[in-house]
Image (cartoon, rainbow, N blue to C red):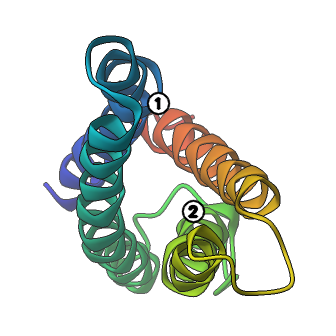
Amino acid sequence: MLVRFRALLAAAWAGFLLCIAFVAAPTAFAVLERAQAGSVVQRLFELDARLGLAAGLLLVMLERRLQRDGVSTGRAGSALGWNTVLPLVALATIVAGYYALQPMMEAAKAGQGALSFGALHGISMAFFALKGLAVLVLAWRVSRPAV
């Protein structure tokens, strides 16, 4: 039961990230004025950060439980197998990409700070891409049939 829930959660999180990246954000900028689209996308990323923290923490806890029960498909006997490391990477990118960079981006919009908004936006996009890759790989790993 926990194995299936872990796979479902990882797949749902990956789908949510793909939806933001390839549907919601581009559509907002295609149909709204730039400032309005920025506000909509900012709200999407806030939601993504909150849901991502919850999903990532839950996935780490599930993996630890499955390892304890001897059910996990990760490396046997390792507390930091790929099924633990990947959600931890995603969590780190959320903290760095949203909670650290977002205030800096707001300051850059106001003309403050050492880096420009464009530079910070590029860094933020790299963190989002890394998070998406980590979650996609995790979803692929945990949905594979046990060998």
> Which of 13 and 31 lies nearest the eye of the viewer?
31
**Picture quadrant where residue 73 is located:** bottom right
What SS does tag 1 mark?
A: helix
Which residue is at 58% across, 68% downward? 109
CA gap, disc 2 to disc 1?
23 Å
Q: Nearer the viewer, mark 2 or mark 1?
A: 1
Question: What's the residue at 42%, 20% (across, down)?
Answer: 26
Q: Amino acid at mark 1?
A: Ala
Q: Residues within 10 Å of mark 1 (few under 14, many from 20)?
A: some
Foreground of the two, 11 or 103? 103
Looking at the image, residue 20 sits to the left or right of residue 95; the answer is left
Return the residue at label 2. Answer: 83
The correct choice, above or below, for 27 with respect to 24 in the image is above
**Residue shown at the point (32%, 35%) measured from the top left:** 37
Identify the mark nearer the N-term, 2 or 1.
Answer: 1
Relative image position of residue 137 (x, y in whole percent): 62, 40
Residue 74 is situated, as x and y percent measured from the top left of the image, at: 61, 61
Identify which amino acid the numbered label 2 is placed on: Asn
Q: Quadrant of the N terminus?
A: bottom left
**Relative side of 92 to 42, left or right:** right
Q: Which quadrant holds residue 105?
A: bottom right
Q: Which residue is mark 1?
A: 21
Residue drawn at x 66%, y 59% as measured from the top left: 124
67, above or below 129, in the image: below
User: Residue 19, position in %: x, y?
Assistant: 33, 26
Q: Residues within 10 Å of mark 2 (few under 14, many from 20)?
A: many
Q: Residue furthest left?
A: 1
